[in-house]
Amino acid sequence: MKLQYLLFALFTVFVIQVQANGGYDDYEQWEHNFPDTCQELFKTKHCNKCQSLMWNHFKNPGQCATAFNLGRDIFEIIKDSGEEPKPYDLTFFKKGLNKYCHEDFHCSQHEVEKIYKKIQDDCKDELSVKFDWSDNPENFKNITAYAAYGTLLTYYTGIPARNALCTKNKHNGDFYSFEFIEKLTQWVKNETNADPKAVVTHDLKFVIKGNGKKVRVPKSFFCDPCWRKIAHIYGDYIKDHRLKKSVEKNIWGSCHDLEKLYLPHCTHKRGLGEILKDRSDSKLSKRNANPAFGVLSHRMNKLHSLAI
């Protein structure tokens, strides 16, 4: 089993909104093949202190591990349904999100700071490893370092993630996070022409098709109102609660870099619905010129981060 389906963590502050949907076909494997020991998990004869710490959190995540707990609820709903999830069908995600957001949440800032500061200390070497977050996650070979970033961010973003996921749009009663994911799923579906192997990079800059070709996520995407509502929740938290500078640098550079990329200045905060419509009109023109234009259908990333 691939470790990335097991660790179920968060690698960028926004990726939970993206990778919480799509194919869940490895869920049964995730459930039944969970390793019995730390050594088995990390494929080593002796777990170091970082691996041991992560193992303890995997076995007992606690309420601060928002990403992990949301994933657990989604998996339980899939299991209880007896159905096989379908590409682009967000039914299970929506039900899991609704279940999770109606559960009690007890995670204090003091508690979570104690956890993520301990991770930074015990995983100092692992968190010094640099990854290209614009690369396909399957190319990340240092599993322990990869897991360390994911575990750190799962807890570090536990409080803002809960708020971002569970904040509702007062106009229609839907979760902003679900509205955003639904729109993004449709955009990727259209953009990749239903490539079932397409993945979204952890920094949300690219969609990588099965053939390795990268498609840039347009900057106008980050002007979507649902996105900005979510992004502000994360951004405000990150500015008030800082990680070690060396760790921040390896993840998102600086708060300024983060804000510049994910909360750009928008002269017109164009909704993603408008962007999708533009894409649709553009493709319609192409279809008139090329009658062989294919039928669209796709699946987003495996549910690995919510992810690793």
Image (cartoon, helix red, strand yellow):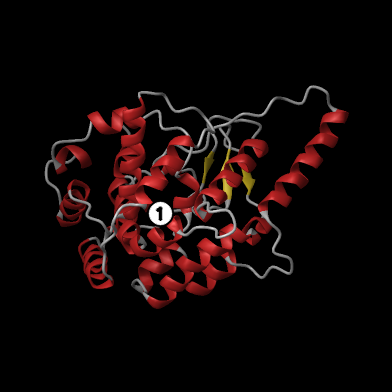
Circle 1 residue: 11
Q: Is residue 126 above or below residue 286?
A: below
Where residue 129 appears, x then y in whole percent?
35, 58
Q: In the image, is 38 to the left or to the right of 251?
A: left
Residue under the image location 31 percent in, 45 percent down: 143
Q: Is residue 65 visible?
A: yes
Q: Is residue 138 left or right of residue 264?
A: left
The x, y position of residue 222, in whole percent, is 62, 59
**Relative to 223, residue 70 above or below:** above
Above or below — where is 247 with respect to 94?
Answer: below
**Residue 292 vs residue 165, the one in the foreground:** 165
Q: Is residue 186 left or right of residue 102?
A: right
Q: Which residue is depicted at the point 40% across and 24% down? A: 83
- Which quadrant of the figure contains the C terminus? top left
Q: Quadrant of the N terminus?
A: top left
**Residue 293: image x %, image y %?**
76, 26
The three-letter amino acid code for the residue at tag 1 is Phe
Foreground residue among 180 and 41: 180
- Can residue 305 be seen by looking at this rendering? no
Q: In this rendering, is residue 15 above or below 29?
A: below
User: Which SS class for mark 1?
Assistant: loop
